[in-house]
Image: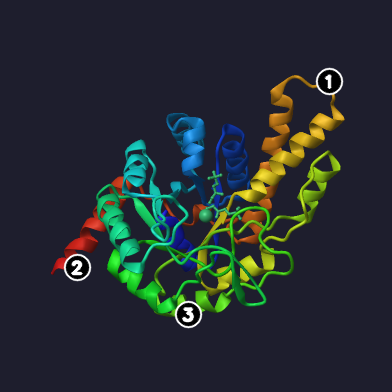
Amino acid sequence: MKQILDEAIKGGYGVGAFNVNNMEQIQGIMQAASETKSPVIIQASRGALKYTKMLYLKYLMVAAAEDNPEIPIALHLDHGNNFETCRQAIELGFTSVMIDGSLKEDSKTHTAFEENVEVTAKVVEYAHKFGVTVEGELGTLGGIEDGVGSGNILLTDPDDAERFVKLTGVDALALAIGTSHGAYKFKQAPVLAMDIITEVKKRLPATPLVMHGSSSVPENLIDIINKYGGTLKHAMGVPIKSIQEAIKRGVKKINVDTDGRLAITGAIRKYMAEHTDVIDPRDYFGEARKAVYETVKSKMIDFGTAGHAGDYKPKTLSDMIEIYKSKYIKKIF
Ligand code: G3H
Ligand code: 13P
Ligand code: ZN
């Protein structure tokens, strides 16, 4: 993932990191990546690994990489909650892990800066020996309206971000700028703390920044769900224009889960409603796969990722082991 994001800095574009739980999501994403010639990050949460019993998802992700040798692809653990989860993911073959040390192991309680540094540095030291990229997080997600904090938001402090990256050696840093996970992010047009991206970028020009909670929650997807029996409240996500602004300022990894979920749910509801005699899951799962493909394809175009798959030769973990080794040797001498 480090190579994918470093190349994105050079090329001035963003790369979507799409959450996956099953074959249809993976195939929809890979079809979009292959058609648009986009590098891609497919990521699994701890919930996804539990749902699929780990090994199944691992082999689906590996199949995606094998089936698309021309596409740079990273297999990433999303929101690892402790060292052990990251270690397991590395053992399983993930090429990148996130250690979310901004929260304690319960994934709910804020940690102190020092505690975050300690667990993140430990994961970095371990992961780099295997050539695996590490994403850390400083600050916690939440929602802000009219510039006033609400919920559990803790925006990232740019000076702390600089200290954090230097102390831990993380390859990529997730910032809290006012986004939140899920379909209900904002009641009105979002106020995001874009200046934080600019300030962090000034201090850490070589570090790719990450934006979580980046789904746009498109109205048309909510409408399809509700038209076919759903009861979702209308809420707002992060508009594409804001994501493009964030990319310009330094965000290079854009995490998207919810929009894929909305696309799948709408497609299945619609198909079921229009074909009340359907019994073959391939019919509606096939529609779901197509909906993921369409959603992801438009993001690859909007984030500027499209067309960049051939810019460089993807590095393997063995290549990365040597690169990290030489970085450490330089540090010692
Ligand atoms: O960041 C959170 C992702 O949306 C994953 O959600 O834990 O329900 O799989 P999940
Ligand atoms: P969304 O819920 O906005 O899709 O965010 C997903 C995410 O940040 C995964 O880590
Ligand atoms: Zn997230």
Can you tell which quarter of the image residue 99 is in?
bottom left
Identify the disc placed on residue 199: 3
Whole-percent x and y of residue 88? 34, 40
Whole-percent x and y of residue 287? 73, 34
Is 47 in front, or is 289?
A: 47
Is 114 in front, or is 313?
A: 114
Q: Does the residue at mark 3 contact the one at mark 1 (Cβ under 8 Å)?
A: no
SS of the residue at dot 2?
Answer: helix
**What residue is drawn where x is 51% and y is 33%?**
51
Can you tell which quarter of the image residue 168 is in?
bottom left
List the residue tagged with mark 2.
Answer: 331
| Picture layout, residue 84 above or below residue 114 | above
Amino acid type for the residue under numbered disc 3: Glu
Amino acid type for the residue under numbered disc 1: Asp
Can you see residue 121?
A: yes
Q: CA distance from mark 3 to mark 1?
A: 57 Å
Can you tell which quarter of the image residue 240 is in?
bottom right
Where is the C terminus found, in terms of image quarters? Answer: bottom left
**What residue is drawn where x is 65% and y is 69%?**
242
> Which of the two marks, 3 or 2, is nearer to us in this view?
3
Q: Does the residue at mark 3 contact the one at mark 2 (Cβ under 8 Å)?
A: no
**What residue is drawn where x is 63% and y is 77%?**
147
Q: Mark 1 CB in 8 Å range of ligand 1? A: no
Q: Earlier in the sequence, mark 3 or mark 2?
A: 3
